[in-house]
Structure formats: C-alpha cells, structure tokens
RNA sequence: GCCCGAGUGGUGGAAUUGGUAGACACGAAGGACUUAAAAUCCUUUGGCCAUUGCGGUCGUGCCGGUUCGAGUCCGGCCUCGGGUACCA
C-alpha cells in the first residue's frame, strides 16, 4: 500500500479508541425513543480464538443495530460470554490450571479480536455466566423452579405452598397438575404423613425435581449429557460414546410447557425450518389411551394357537391385571391383533407364564446387554418374545397375545401398544416375522379390500374408510377416531390423550466447572438455600476429577456443608443453565437486588432480533423459551416469548488446499505403461503379467522381455532370482529403479528400446546415493488420480491455488527434500470445501485479514460472500474486490496526491439519481437482511459516481451516513474530514426522495414468443394501446414480424412487451 | 425411513410479486502506464456456431405440465445439505 492511499490501520485504531473513550455505544433507558434489542448468541470463549466464521453473525447484527440506531431507535446491543464449558475443564483435568484462569485468558483474547472488528456493543453491560454476580440469578431461578408446580387449570406455574395447602385441605384428587405419577391421597392421609413423606410427594410436582432416570452417561467425560448434547450415540462435544444408565438426577419439568412451547412458535418470526425442528422435537401427538384386561384363568379361547398351551390351568396368570396403551389411531382398534410391551414394562414378569419364562428372560437379557449404538444399528431387525398371556380386545372381544419387543419404548406413552399390523409398518413387520394375524380395517376410497397377508407393506395413511370394524364401519378415519374415543369414555375403558416426545430436561452434571446447586440435604431430602445465602460460590478443589468412589468433583471440596452441617449438592448445572436467561440480565446487568428490575424489563421487553447458529435449535433455543415462560408466569418478565425474530447465520466453511503426494511405484508403473501400451515401442506389452506364482510389471512376448519397476534396494534383492528365472526361459530382463522416473526418463526409454531391438542390456544399473524423498504432482498432470494421494496443505502456503514450493519445503521437517512435478513450473493445488478446522489446515484467522485489509473490508467482505442464512465456503481471493472498493470510495474524496477535495457545487440530476436510488436500495436491503446485495449496491454507486467524477458534498455526505453501518471506521474518518465534530454514529439515516427517481422514459425489452429481441425507449406515461402501436410501427419490429401474422401483443407497463406471432 | 432446505458460468453469488437470466465481485486472458514491481486503468470472459460486422442457437439438476412469457408456479424423479430416528 502506498502513502497515496487510505491508511486503514491508523484510522481504524483512532476511531476504536474514540468510541471507547466517548462511550459512544453505551445506552440507557430513554422513553423518548422506541427501543430495539439486537442480540447475538453469546460465545463460549474457546482457546482457539475466532476464525472468520464466528464474526459473520456479529457483523450482520452490528450493521442492523447501527442502522436501527440511525433510524431513531434506542438500540440495546450487548455482548458477554457463555463462560462455563467443557474444554476449560478438560484442560484443568490435564494441567491442574483452574478453569477460571483459562477462561479469563480466552475471554481477553476474544475481546481483543472483537474490538478489532469495530462492533457497537455496549460493553458496560457485559455478563459472564461463571461470575458469582451473574450465576446468583441462575441459582435463584432454580430455587423458584423448585418452589413451583404447574397448574393445568390456570395453565401456568404456581407456588408450591398453594399446592401444599390444597393437599392439606382436600388431598390431591382434585389437583390437575403436570406431575409424575402419584397415588391418590386424602387430606387426612396428608396430615398423617411424615415430613419426609410429604417432601417425597411434593417432589412429584416441583418444576425442578430429583428423580431416578435413564440418562445419557458419557464415561469418557465422566458426566451425564442432555438429549440435545448427544448425536447418534456419541457426545456432540468430543465425540465420545454415550450409554444409557439409571441415576438420580435433577430434572426440569419442561414437558409441562410442551403445548405453550409448541403453540408459541406461531407467534414468533423464526425460519420455518427451525420451527419445524422444534415442533418435531416437542413431538405432540393426539390420540387416546385405552385399557386392556388380561385374560384370567377362566378364559379358554385364544385367537391364535401359540407356543404355550392356554388350556393348561397352571400355565395361566391371574386376571387382575390391566394394561393401558396409548395410540394415535383409536380408529384401528378392531384391527388390533396383538399387544406389545416394552421389555422394561413393570408387568412383564407377572404376565410371563412358566412355559415362556426362559424365552422372555433370554430376550430381556439380550436387550439389556445391547448398547445404545447396537440397538440403533439394528432398527430394521425384528425381534421379540411371547409372554404366554393374553388380553381381551375390548371392542372385538378377541383374546390377543401379549409380546415384548424393544421397538416399544418404556419412555413414551405407557410403554405398551396395541399392535395394528395392517396399518402400522412396525407392527406389520413384527406380525409377518412372528406369523401373527393381520386384519384390514381401513380401506382406501374406491378400492376393493384385499387379504393383508399378501401385502408388501402396511397401509399407514389416515385417508380412508373403516371396514371390519363394527359400529364404526363406513366412517372416515377422523370421525372414527372421535367415535371410538367417545365410546371408550362412555364405557370407562379409555379417554382422549395427548402425548409428547419431549422429555424433561436433565439438569445435573457431574462436573466441576458449572453453577453449584443452591441445595443441601437433610434426611436425604433436598432443601434449597435461602436467598441471602446466594450466590453459593464454587468451592476450590484439589483436583478436577471425580472422586475415587465416582462422586462428582465437588465432593472433593472441603467443608462442602451448610452452616448447620448439612451436605451440599455435589452436582453442578449444565451449560444451558446460564445461557437460558442471559438476555434478561443484559437489561439490568449490575443489579445486586434483583435478576433485573421491572422498570428495565418494561422498557426493553424482549429481544427484537436474535442472531445465531441453527445448531441451537433443540437446545438453547428451547430451554431459553421455557425459562422465559416460567419467569413470565412468575410475573417477572412481560413477554412470553424471549426472541421475537431469529436469524440463523449459515456456517462459513473452510476451503482446503490439497497437494498430491505421488505413490512412486504406482506413478512409475503408470508412466511406463503410457510408454509401452498400444505398441508404442513397436511391440506389444502386457501389464501385470503372471506366470504361475511369479508376477511381472510388464512383459512382452514378442521381444522376450520382462520389465520390473521397484525401489533400488528392493531390486537388488530380486536381481538374482529374476535373472535365473529369465535365463531359464530365455528372456531378457530389465530392472528399473524408481529414481530413474524422476531423474532419467530418457535413459529408461533408451534402455527399453535397445532391449526391444534385440540388444543385450544389463538387467540392473547400479546407482549410488539413493535418497528417499516425497514427490508431489501438480493437480492437472495427466493420470494424477491414478498414482497420487491428496494431502491437506496449509492455506497460507497457497495463493490463487498455486503452491509456494519453497515455503512448503520448510513447512514440516520431512518435506525439506520434496520434489515437484509441475505444470510449466507451477504447482497447482486442488481444493475442497469442508469444515474449518485445525487438522485440515484451512482455518482463516480474522486478525491476519484485518492486518492486511482492515476491519471495514473484512466486515463488508463477509457480508458480500452471500446471503446471511446460507452456508458458504470462505475464499480469501475475493476479499481483494472489496478492498479495491474501499479505496475507490476513499478516492472519491481525494485527488491524485491524496489530498481531500470536496466540491460545494450543486449536484446534477444524474448524481442525485444515483444517490437516491442507492439509498432506497440499501434501506430495503437492510430491512430484508440482504447485506450481500447491499454491498453490491454500494459498489455500483461508487462506480457510477466515479464515472461522473462526482466529489460533491451534497452527494458524499449522505453516502457516508448510508455506509456507516457497514464501514464504521471509514465513515467516521470521512465524516470528520468533511468538518463534522460529532460522531457519525449519532447522525440520522439519509432518506430517499422519489422526485429524483422518476424517469421520463422506460426502455422496454421487446420479445417475440418470450424471446427478447430488441429494446425500445418509450415514455413512462404512455398508455398500453399507444405502446402497442408504437412498437408494431417500429423499424426493428417489422424485421421480426416480416411475413408473419401478429396474433397478440402483451404490454406490461414499464416492464415488458411480448409479441406473439 | 420420515420432516425441512438447496441445486444458476471456472468460483462466490444476483434476478424482491411469473416479465431483459448471469447484476456485483473473484479468477482467467489480452493491453496501457512503469527501468521493474506494486498499485491503477482499459478490453474480453456461460456453451456452441459464425466471426468481416450483423448475428444465430442452446442454456438456471433431470423429465413433463400450466402460461403470451417459468430460475421463479404445478406433478414426478435425481443429487447434495440439515433435522430426526422404532415416539405407537
């Protein structure tokens, strides 16, 4: 960069200092202006720092914040850190460094990188989830959850004390609550319970509760993981195997909010795909529950003969059992021909007849021993076992067999299903496999029912008419569902019911680096600390590992007891605890008395625009909504939904560079074959010739010649056996060392051609000083793919896909002797788009780019790359274009000597048109978050003004304001150079005026049968009829219509003319 | 398997409501300036045919449809990406 240019380094530093000193971005409640809250998902400060993908969302939200601010809004735009996390703790385990120290260091690095990008964050509001002043409120919220229950009458959370008084007055029979299964008790019984018994009952109702649950246990991490932290049987962080295990854990009763979480989605402005993901995750399904009675010893007729003999008295179980099932298809009840229980179902033992005992036990054992991964891998395999017992189908009266199978899950519904093989694909497969009866009960309209035994697959659709179904025959599916539910209710054997896939959130982690639970234990029952004991600070420990008897690390803390000597909970909270309500704390971050004040919440309300990655769809974005709804129920926050609009920025993928390492033997064989094949040497050769167990690379019968290609030391060993073989067969022998293919190709050709011509040749020419060295071949070298393997090379060694060969040699020690097979002296690298990661050597660090091009260029380039929501590969080459644009912009204001020259002359109509067209376009693009097209529009504008040689203040001043959200440093500099002494941040956004955009004429594209042929300039005001006449009368038109009849003319005013011929 | 989303030049992408496909950039090729380099500027740049200019023709993953007109709408398929996985 020459001195005659824009000095971005100096300028950017200057304005960053100025913003910091002037506290330009600090905001407060200001009732004279409307608020607007723009939030980024806060980062976990990892040791690696930012790569170019991270700031993408921050840049977009920063542009939007600045834009809104200039539009007159009071914009809250804070930033902070999700500071608890596994990497710092893993590092602590390895090195003994306290995670707080690692985290502090990483945060400092993040902050430095963020500052360099010129963001407009109000850093006075920064929060860190690991700071006691912050996590006090995480703990406080937990206590509120513990002290709350979910009232299904009012459909909101209420205080647990109200429930206690209800129990004391009336028992629990009348209570409609989201709770665990609890036996009915009277007020009297309640009064007679011990405190411990009462506490145990209350635990079934609390929104934060302790329970034995099947959890995702990750042995490698030594902790439990939430469902969203596990993917396909492995931990999302670290990729370690996860197993199912039963443990006592804290859970949050998020399922109480399932409906509100589901229906709330309709009120917020998020992408349909994220909403769909959440809808699927919640997995609401409506249906009914139905009770089946087990057939007792009296029963004798079964639907199907089975392995057990139902007639044998001793082989029957008691008939006092009832099994409840959940189904979304009550209409298919007449087709239910068997029942399946989950292997863990509590009745399995009791229902198993002596005959079947062995089978059932074997199956249960098999299921237990299978890992989660094996189970998932074997989804398609049908397996199960018969219990020997039967239930009665309450509608058909038929006795149907009870099986167990692991395709029925204990955790969903009741852990039991009525199997309708004709209309459920899994039941169908099961029935086919075990030869169970299949009855068709739904018939597609207009079709003749067929024998389901001949079906290839079940008919699962909800479209159709009921058959073989007693009182619901001829009904449509929807009506039949209603009818069966109603009839079940009437008969007291079932009712309508809704089920959810969503599970309560496991809230305990066996880790050190997280929020301690504000909980202690008395008589093994948990109690919460009082508010004045908060925050409960994380205690020091001697090591960050679990104890020898497997307790979490906090069990190592000395005196981890209350003042009264009660032990404190040793689990800590999960990552999502601190991130679930942080946006609320930003409203009033320093408040020592409250989570946030009512006043601040009344003003800032909720987040208007939230920007972050889609990977949080089933984690943070659902937990935060739950957290917020709970606080809403408590009357703490005024909005039920926390994030009104959500934008998911796409990932920036890495663009890896590849070099091709030659497999020398394959290479030599390939090259030589190119020389020998198709009689190129005058005789025909065979490749990979075999004679008995001997194998030669090349053989020519005509020339009586054997050629073998190998490393020289290998050839030395082979020379004697080969020579004696060839002598015995009367053949000539050529042994060619690999080195010759790189150094002496001509020599090889000469030797072969001499041998082919019948001359005697020496089998092996000794070479000395043979070295091993890697050989790399350029991408477009013919045959490359046959003899080379692609390796990743650091992208800093590659420019425009050309490898810096000298730098490459010094990159890693073993490459120092590398040799290259080039294309005209150039080594061309291949490339691939994949995840940005250290191991692929494709990480682009923003600091380097800022150093070379400046923050404004980087900001605009990241936006220019493509639509914000789309994933796209990073390509460093393209940044030059934006860099040129920034300097072109600078040059609009400066002459050849880099002196500021601004004209005070009035702008021409043309210049005004360029300006106002740009303002209109940019404003529209900003509102649509179409930042890539906005950058293009700026480029077009500057190109045009450049062409007009426009340096007029009346044009450039609005332009500086217009571009300031995108290039804040450059625009501050220009604004001040033009004589203003107040920051451009505080200016208003320029407004476009229609009068400058009105055109007199429009250049109509004229097409014939839809194909554009020419253009015609016509007045904008001209009516359709006149346009038609003008076009048809034009010279150009006659050329195209010659000899053809015009059938129709379509005129769309100021758009297009289409002539049909 | 099921539910979403996407497929446009060598590359990133544009075309906002059915109305000029390829804006804006990168890269590439050629040229100007320069002792040289950097920087800057100019020309060309979807394919094919024609090339002396005019031009012609095909073309938005594939096949079909609606329409005066389809990258855009409809039906069917293919490929890639994301989510989910026995959820009854």
Image: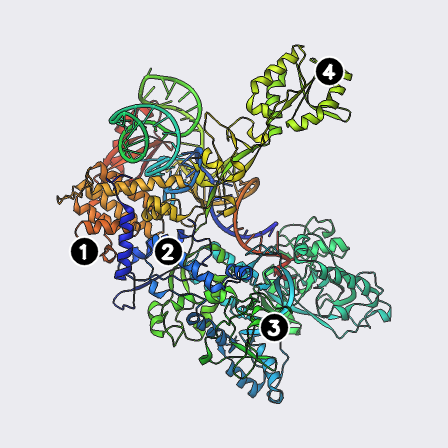
**Which badge, 4 or 2, is on the more N-terminal residue?**
2
State the image coordinates of residue A768 (x, y, percent, origin top left).
61, 25
Residues at circles 4 and 2 in contact by the CB criterion of under 8 Å:
no
Residue that extends furthest to the left in the rendered view of this protein:
A905
Q: What element carries label 1?
A: loop
Q: Nearer the viewer, mark 3 or mark 1?
A: 1
Q: Quadrant of the N terminus of chain A?
A: top left
Q: In this view, does A1038 lie above or below A302?
A: above
**Distance in Å between CA atoms under marks 2 and 3:** 44 Å
Observer able to see residue A1029:
no
Q: Name the residue under label 1.
A: A981
Q: In this view, does B56 lie above or below B62?
A: above
Q: Residues within 10 Å of mark 4 (few under 14, many from 20)?
A: some
Q: Name the residue under label 2.
A: A112
**Which badge, 3 or 4, is on the more N-terminal residue?**
3
Q: Residues within 10 Å of mark 1 (few under 14, many from 20)?
A: few
Horizontal relation, residue A468 to residue A302: left or right? left
State the image coordinates of residue A895 (x, y, percent, origin top left).
19, 39
- Looking at the image, which residue is at 41% across and 62% down? A643
Q: Mark 3 points at which residue?
A: A211
Q: Is mark 2 on a helix, strand or loop?
A: helix
Chain of the residue displaying label 2: A
């Amino acid at each position: 960069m020459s001195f005659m240019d824009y000095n971005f380094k100096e300028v950017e530093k200057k304005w960053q200092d100025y913003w910091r000193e002037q506290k330009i971005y600090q905001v407060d409640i200001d009732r004279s202006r409307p608020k607007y809250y723009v939030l980024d998902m806060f980062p976990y400060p990892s040791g690696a720092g930012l790569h170019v993908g991270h700031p993408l969302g921050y840049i977009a939200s920063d542009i939007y914040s600045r834009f809104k601010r200039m539009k007159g809004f009071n914009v809250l735009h804070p930033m902070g850190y999700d500071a608890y996390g596994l990497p710092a703790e893993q590092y602590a385990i390895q090195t003994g460094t306290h995670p707080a120290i690692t985290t502090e260091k990483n945060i400092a690095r993040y902050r430095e990188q963020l500052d360099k990008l010129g963001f407009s964050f109000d850093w006075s509001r920064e929060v860190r989830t690991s700071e006691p002043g912050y996590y006090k409120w995480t703990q406080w919220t937990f206590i509120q959850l513990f002290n709350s229950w979910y009232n299904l009458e009012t459909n909101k959370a209420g205080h647990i004390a109200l429930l206690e008084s209800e129990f004391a007055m009336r028992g629990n029979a009348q209570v409609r609550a989201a709770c665990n299964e609890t036996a009915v008790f009277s007020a009297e019984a309640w009064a007679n319970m011990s405190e411990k018994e009462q506490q145990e009952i209350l635990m079934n109702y609390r929104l934060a509760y302790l329970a034995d649950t099947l959890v995702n246990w990750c042995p490698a991490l030594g902790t439990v993981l939430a469902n969203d932290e596990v993917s396909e049987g492995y931990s999302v962080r670290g990729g370690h195997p996860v197993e199912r295990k039963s443990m006592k854990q804290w859970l949050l009763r998020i399922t109480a909010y399932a409906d509100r979480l589901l229906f709330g989605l309709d009120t917020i402005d998020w992408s349909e795909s994220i909403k769909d993901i959440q809808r699927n995750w919640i997995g609401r399904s409506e249906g009914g529950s139905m009770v089946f009675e087990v057939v007792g010893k009296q029963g004798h007729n079964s639907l199907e003969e089975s392995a057990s003999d139902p007639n044998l008295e001793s082989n029957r179980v008691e008939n006092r059992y009832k099994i409840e099932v959940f189904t979304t298809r009550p209409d298919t009840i007449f087709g239910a021909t068997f029942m399946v229980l989950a292997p863990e179902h509590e009745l399995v033992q009791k229902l198993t007849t002596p005959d079947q005992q062995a089978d059932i036990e074997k199956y249960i054992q098999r299921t237990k021993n299978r890992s989660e991964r094996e189970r998932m891998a074997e989804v398609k395999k049908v397996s199960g076992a018969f219990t020997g017992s039967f239930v009665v189908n309450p509608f058909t009266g038929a006795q149907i067999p009870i099986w167990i199978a692991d395709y029925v899950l204990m955790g969903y519904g009741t852990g039991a299903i009525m199997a309708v093989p004709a209309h459920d694909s899994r039941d169908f497969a099961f029935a086919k496999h075990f030869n169970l009866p299949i009855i068709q009960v739904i018939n597609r309209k207009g079709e003749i029912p067929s024998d389901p035994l001949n079906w290839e697959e079940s008919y699962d659709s909800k479209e159709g008419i009921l058959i073989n179904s007693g009182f619901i025959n001829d009904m449509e599916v929807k009506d039949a569902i209603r009818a069966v539910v109603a009839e079940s209710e009437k008969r007291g054997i079932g009712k309508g019911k809704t089920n959810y896939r969503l599970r309560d959130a496991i809230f305990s982690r066996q880790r050190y680096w997280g929020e301690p639970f504000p909980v202690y234990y008395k008589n093994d029952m948990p109690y919460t600390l009082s508010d004045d004991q908060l925050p409960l600070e994380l205690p020091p420990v001697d090591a960050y590992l679990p104890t020898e008897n497997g307790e979490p690390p906090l069990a190592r803390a000395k005196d981890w007891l209350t003042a009264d000597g009660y032990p404190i909970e040793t689990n800590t909270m999960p990552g999502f605890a601190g991130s679930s309500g942080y946006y609320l704390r930003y409203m009033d971050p320093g408040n020592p008395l409250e989570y946030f004040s009512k006043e601040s919440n009344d003003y800032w309300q909720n987040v208007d625009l939230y920007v972050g990655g889609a990977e949080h769809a089933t984690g943070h974005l659902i937990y935060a909504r739950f957290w917020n709804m709970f606080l809403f129920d408590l009357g703490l926050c005024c909005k039920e939904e926390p994030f009104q609009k959500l934008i998911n920025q796409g990932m920036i993928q890495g663009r890896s560079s590849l070099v091709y390492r030659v497999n020398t033997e394959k290479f030599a064989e390939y090259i030589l074959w190119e020389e020998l094949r198709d009689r190129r040497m005058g005789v025909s050769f065979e490749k990979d010739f075999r004679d008995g167990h001997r194998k030669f690379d090349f053989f020519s019968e005509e020339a009586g010649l054997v050629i073998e290609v190998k490393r020289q030391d290998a050839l030395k060993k082979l020379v004697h056996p080969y020579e004696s073989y060839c002598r015995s067969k009367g053949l000539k022998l050529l042994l060619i060392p690999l080195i010759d293919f790189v150094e002496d190709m001509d020599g090889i050709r000469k030797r072969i051609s001499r041998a082919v011509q019948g001359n005697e040749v020496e089998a092996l020419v000794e070479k000395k000083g043979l070295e091993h060295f890697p050989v790399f071949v350029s991408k477009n070298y013919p045959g490359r793919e046959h003899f080379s393997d692609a390796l990743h090379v650091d992208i800093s060694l590659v420019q425009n896909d050309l490898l810096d060969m000298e730098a490459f040699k010094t990159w890693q020690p073993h490459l120092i002797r590398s040799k290259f097979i080039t294309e005209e002296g150039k080594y061309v690298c291949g490339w691939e788009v994949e995840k940005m990661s250290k191991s692929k050597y494709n990480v682009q660090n923003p600091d380097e780019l800022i150093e070379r091009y400046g923050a404004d260029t980087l900001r605009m380039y990241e936006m220019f790359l493509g639509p914000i929501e789309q994933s796209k590969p990073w390509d460093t080459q393209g940044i030059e274009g934006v860099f040129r644009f920034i300097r072109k912009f600078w040059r609009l204001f400066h002459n050849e000597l880099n002196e500021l020259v601004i004209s005070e002359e009035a702008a021409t109509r043309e210049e005004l048109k360029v300006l106002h067209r740009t303002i209109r376009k940019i404003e529209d693009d900003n509102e649509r978050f179409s930042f890539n097209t906005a950058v293009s529009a700026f480029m077009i504008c500057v190109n045009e003004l450049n062409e007009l040689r426009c340096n007029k203040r009346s044009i450039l001043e609005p332009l500086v304001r217009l571009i300031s959200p995108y290039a804040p440093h450059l625009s501050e500099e220009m604004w001040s150079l033009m004589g203003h002494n107040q920051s451009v941040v505080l200016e208003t956004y320029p407004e476009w005026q229609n009068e400058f955009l009105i055109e007199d004429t429009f250049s109509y594209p004229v097409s014939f049968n839809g194909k554009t042929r020419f253009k015609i300039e016509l007045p904008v005001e001209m009516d359709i009829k006149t346009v038609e006449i003008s076009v048809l009368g034009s010279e150009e038109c006659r050329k195209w219509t010659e000899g053809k009849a015009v059938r129709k003319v379509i005129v769309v005013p100021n758009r297009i003319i289409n002539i049909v011929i």
